[in-house]
Amino acid sequence: MSEEDNMTDTQRRDFLKLAGSAPALGLLGTVSTARAGKNGRVVVVGGGFGGTIAAKYIKRFDPSVEVTLVEKNPVYYTCPFSNTVLAGMNSMDRITHDYKKLAQNNDIKVIHDEVTAVDPDGKKVSLKDGKALQYDKLVMSPGISLDFNALEGYDESAADKMPHAWKAGSQTRRLRTQLENMKDGGTVIIAPPDNPFRCPPGPYERASLIAHYLKQNKPKSRVVILDSKEKFSKMALFQDAWAELYGNMIEWWPKSQGGEVRGVDIAKMRVLTVDDYWKADVANVIPPQRANQIAQDTGLTNESGWCPVDQANFQSTLQDDIHVIGDACIAGAMPKSGYAANSQGKVAAAAIVSELRGQKPPEPSWVNTCYSLAAPQYGISVAAVYELEDGKITGVEGAGGVSPRQAPTSTRTMEAIYAKGWYNAITEDMFT
């Protein structure tokens, strides 16, 4: 999608209100629940933006299906809105959610354990506690693995000193503490990976909200983005916001200007580019990503490190009766975002229930909306609708769009309000 706004102001405002207040049903034809379908066992691996939704909507479409959700952690920290914690706008409680209401309200069995293996031939999921779960259909929504070997000197132990904070939780707390302890006049370096990766606008929202914190508390400091790309999501909108809100506090160095990071020197707190190095007081190094290790071990990934799927229903093209959704899958034009995973989870749920009934799945369609905050009262967004064309998920021309560049303060303020509504709605959809 270009950086041009493809909607009229009124159309775009109505679209964003809808997207910000209630996650759409994937723009999907409703699966009839007038009669219970034949019983089946569905296991869902991963309790994030895709897995919770797939589990919930399978039960909603057919209450007779036995659904088990397996998630290692008893609480889930959302990556969306984790940047507001770094900025001091919210506490960790704001992004922390448990699974009690999801289980109780939807008759879903939730197991907090680690999946150690998946046997596609035997249709069995093995857990760390030694138990095994049989399934008729398996939904894999495992998220990402960070490729710690991609950058010289950067591994899991290095993330203690140079946190990635790309999986929210303890890493979010660590990065926040480092920002609090940094001296005024310090340098914060953010090193985003090359595409594809989880939440494409996330590093640039992070730069914005860290700059907001610094402007309020340590105004002599700066944020340097060392990027391995030449452009990024909502680029013009972010750069306009940086100039308006932060002056010269944020610097962006693309690959062509020496921004590509090749490694780190933990002992000297230096980030190494191809031709130089940068001294950091705080370094947020986000390594390249691929599908989570369990997806790789199950034989769901190809040479790209991601999971190819039939994009009509997210059935794996490499293993039978396994659907892969969310960040781990290859989903055509859809980005790796929370709202995309939500939309994919509903499409996969409808397809699975239809297949268990021996029926043809409804024609799918998808939607994605992504908000970013450049400051507490300054929001920008991108929205898109997708359809299936020749077996591939493609954007619907003329549907959606990005925030207009020349917009009054009131528009930015309203989009910040919509962002909060979006977060409240999507997490309620996930966890209740």
Image (tube, helix red, strand yellow):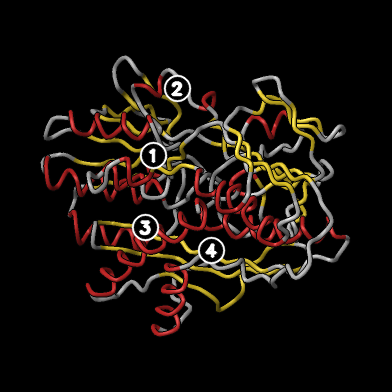
> How would you rate the neighbour count of disc 3 (Cα within 10 Å): few for under 14, some for 14-19, many for 20 or more?
many
Look at 46% across and 73% down and name the residue there.
18
| In the image: residue 320, left or right of residue 129 | right
Q: Is residue 390 visible?
A: no
For disc 4, the neighbor class at 10 Å (few under 14, some 14 to 19, many from 20) is many
* Res. 368 mark: 4
Determine the residue positioned at 31% across, 24% down: 270
Q: Is residue 69 above or below residue 15?
A: above
* Other-residue count near label 1 (Cα within 10 Å), few / some / many at <14 / 14–19 / ≥20: many
Mark 4 belongs to which amino acid?
Asn
Marks 4 and 1, Cα distance to the nearest angstrom?
Answer: 30 Å
Q: Which residue is mark 2?
A: 154
Q: Is residue 173 above or below residue 236?
A: above
Name the residue carrying label 3.
372
Q: What is the C-alpha distance between the residues marked 1 and 3?
A: 23 Å
Q: Is residue 58 above or below residue 267?
A: below
- SS category of the residue bearing label 1: loop
Residue 53, placed above or below residue 394: above
The answer for how far apart the CA atoms under marks 3 and 2 are is 28 Å
